[in-house]
Amino acid sequence: MSETAEPSLRDRKKMRTRDRIFVAAVELFGTRPYDDVTVEEICEKAEVGRATFFRFYGSKAGLIGEYGRRLAEHIARRLDQMPGTTATQQLWALQDEIVTAWGMSGPSTREMAREWIRNATADDLHAAHPPEMLALVADIVREGQGAGEFTTAYEPDLVAWVIMASLSSITAAWLGGDDESLAPRTRDTISFLLTGLAAGPAPPAPAS
C-alpha cells in the first residue's frame, strides 16, 4: 500500500476533535434510538460547539462518513496482516470486511446511513465514498496490475470508484430492507468485476 505523509500538528488536532465528536455520538446512539439523539447532545458530550460539529460533519447523518473512514482503516490493517497475498485475495478480504462491518452494525448506525441516503443530493452520492477507501482499493488494483494479475486497460482510480459504487449500491438496497442480499450480492459483484479485471481467466469466488 502507498505511504502517506505524517499529518501536521494542526491536522492531528482536527482529527482528535473529529474523533471525539464521533465517539460521543456512537456512545449516545448506544443508549437511545438514533432519532432521539440531538446534535446538541452530541456537542455537549464531545465538548464542542455546534459550529464545529457542522464544519466536520454537516449533519447528524454526515457522521456516516466517519464510519466509512474507520472501516477503511480497519481494512487497511487487515491487509497489512496479509503479506504475500494476491490482489484478488485482497479484494475478497475487502468484501468480507464490508459485509461483516454492516452485519454487526447497530440499529442507530443503520438508521444514520438510511437518513443520509434519503437526504443525499446527486453531488453527495458522487462523493459518497471516503477518499481513504478509494485510495485503498486503487492501491489494490494498481498492485494487481503491476503483478500481471489484472489488465492495465483501466485506470486504478476508476476501477476503485466502480468497485465501491457497486458495493455501496448493494449495501444501500440491503439497508432498505433486503436482509438476505448483502453477502451473496457483494460476492457476485466482486466475482463479476474480477472477470473484467483479470488478465486471464478470473478465479472463482471463495466458498461461503
Image (cartoon, rainbow, N blue to C red):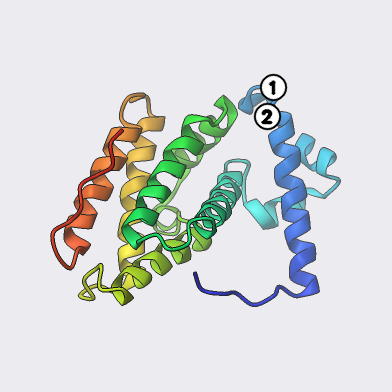
Q: Amino acid at mark 1?
A: Arg
Picture quadrant of residue 8: bottom right
Q: Please say if 169 is above or below 82.
A: above
Circle 1/circle 2 CB separation < 8 Å: yes
Residue 203 screen position, x and y as percent:
20, 53
Dot label at residue 32: 1
Picture quadrant of residue 40: top right
Q: Is 36 situated left or right of 17 in this image?
A: left
Quarter of the figure with the C terminus: top left
Task: Determine the residue positioned at 69% across, 36% down.
Answer: 26
Q: Residue furthest front?
A: 84
Q: Is 106 situated left or right of 147 in this image?
A: right
Residue 207 screen position, x and y as percent:
28, 36
Closest to the observer, 91 or 120 = 91
- Distance CA(mark 1)–CA(mark 2): 5 Å
Closest to the observer, 163 or 33 = 163
Closest to the observer, 10 or 150 = 150
Dot label at residue 29: 2
Q: Mark 2: which secondary structure?
A: helix
Q: Please say if 9 is above or below 164.
A: below
